[in-house]
């Protein structure tokens, strides 16, 4: 009886929400017959839904009107990926401030809700890594630690409590980001991430196109790209120039972010 009591106490303690709204646990990764995923080497650090929603991570909430828009985007992306047998997608924008990281995160969550595949979201904005800021309290490690300090990849990967979604944060910024993106160790990492699981879709959150050459340097290693533009801010000339610079990559299309137009009516 004492062993049972200890096990129950342990289970209760592992499910208490901490002060930062997170549920830290560790699981092992492996598929189950009912399409659920168990994690063996990836740390599970679950954010409370309210904490995510405060940061405009809306795809977790079926009642949020924006969730429907991300589902439409998800379906369009999946159709193009499946038609061309692609599994990697870069998310970028012409200039800063268009909301590419938040778009990438919401799209990743929406994609992960489909049971036929898993999703890996990678913070490849080496100049200004931001993905970790949506999950305060996660271990302070990222791609920079893997590249510079030989930290094992498995100790960096995080499951944010959303089934079938794994995140690879960026952590520290790089001054020589474009050179790092095309370095042999980075190329080896990217190829390994894309090839590890046949049913995995890999999303790369990249810097904006126009301020630097990072996206151009990284373009050969992804199948396609999605451009996020900001309503009322992105200029037509900026979008055209970004498309010209990405002439070597398949552009799936654009996402109009921060739109001021009325939402589509919620009825048939």
Image: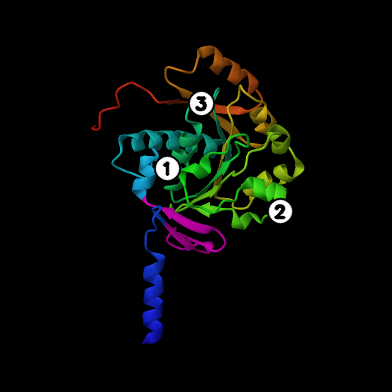
Q: Which mark is residue 195?
A: none
Foreground residue, 263 or 149?
A: 149
Residue ID for mark 3: 253
Q: Which mark is residue 110?
A: 1
Around disc 2, counting alpha carbons within 10 Å, would you say few (fewer than 14), some (14 to 19), or many (20 or more)? few
Q: Say whether disc 2 or disc 3 marks the residue closer to the N-terminus.
A: 2
CA gap, disc 1 and disc 2: 32 Å
For the N terminus, which image quadrant? bottom left
The figure's colour scheme reads: rainbow
Q: Is residue 39 magenta?
A: yes
Residue beneath the point at 41% across and 73% down: 10
- As drawn, which residue projects farthest toward the top? 237
Residue beneath the point at 46% across and 18% down: 233
Q: Magenta stretch: give its range.
A: 23-48
Q: Say whether disc 1 or disc 2 marks the residue closer to the N-terminus.
A: 1
For the C terminus, which image quadrant? top left
Residue 7 in the figure: left or right of residue 81: left
Location of residue 55 (image quadrant)? top left
- As drawn, which residue projects farthest toward the front? 19
CA gap, disc 3 and disc 1: 18 Å
On the image, the x and y values in percent for residue 241 come to: 60, 16
Relative to 89, is 260 above or below?
above
On the image, the x and y values in percent for residue 197 come to: 59, 52
Is residue 257 visible from the viewing direction of this image? yes
- As drawn, which residue projects farthest toward the bottom? 1
Residue ID for mark 2: 150
On the image, the x and y values in percent for residue 205 come to: 56, 37
């Amino acid at each position: 009886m004492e062993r049972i009591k200890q096990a129950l106490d342990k289970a209760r303690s592992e499910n208490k929400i901490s002060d930062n709204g997170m549920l830290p646990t560790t699981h092992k990764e492996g598929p189950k017959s009912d399409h659920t995923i168990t994690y063996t080497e990836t740390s599970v650090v679950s954010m409370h839904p309210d904490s995510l929603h405060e940061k405009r991570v809306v795809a977790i909430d079926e009642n949020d009107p924006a969730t429907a828009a991300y589902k439409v985007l998800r379906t369009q992306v999946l159709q193009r990926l499946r038609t061309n047998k692609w599994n990697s997608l870069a998310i970028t924008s012409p200039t800063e401030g268009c909301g590419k990281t938040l778009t990438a995160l919401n799209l990743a969550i929406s994609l992960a809700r489909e049971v036929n595949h898993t999703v890996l979201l990678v913070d490849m904005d080496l100049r200004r890594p931001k993905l970790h800021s949506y999950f305060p309290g996660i271990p302070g490690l990222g791609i920079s630690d893997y590249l510079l300090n030989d930290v094992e990849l498995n100790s960096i990967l995080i499951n944010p409590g959303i089934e079938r979604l794994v995140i690879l944060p960026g952590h520290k910024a790089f001054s020589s980001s474009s050179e790092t993106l095309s370095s042999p160790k980075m190329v080896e990492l990217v190829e390994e991430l894309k090839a590890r699981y046949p049913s995995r879709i890999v999303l790369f959150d990249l810097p904006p196109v126009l301020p630097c050459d990072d996206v151009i340097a990284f373009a050969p290693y992804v199948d396609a790209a999605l451009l996020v533009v900001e309503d009322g801010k992105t200029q037509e000339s900026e979008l055209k120039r970004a498309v010209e610079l990405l002439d070597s990559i398949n552009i799936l299309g654009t996402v109009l972010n921060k739109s001021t137009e009325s939402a589509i009516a919620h009825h048939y």
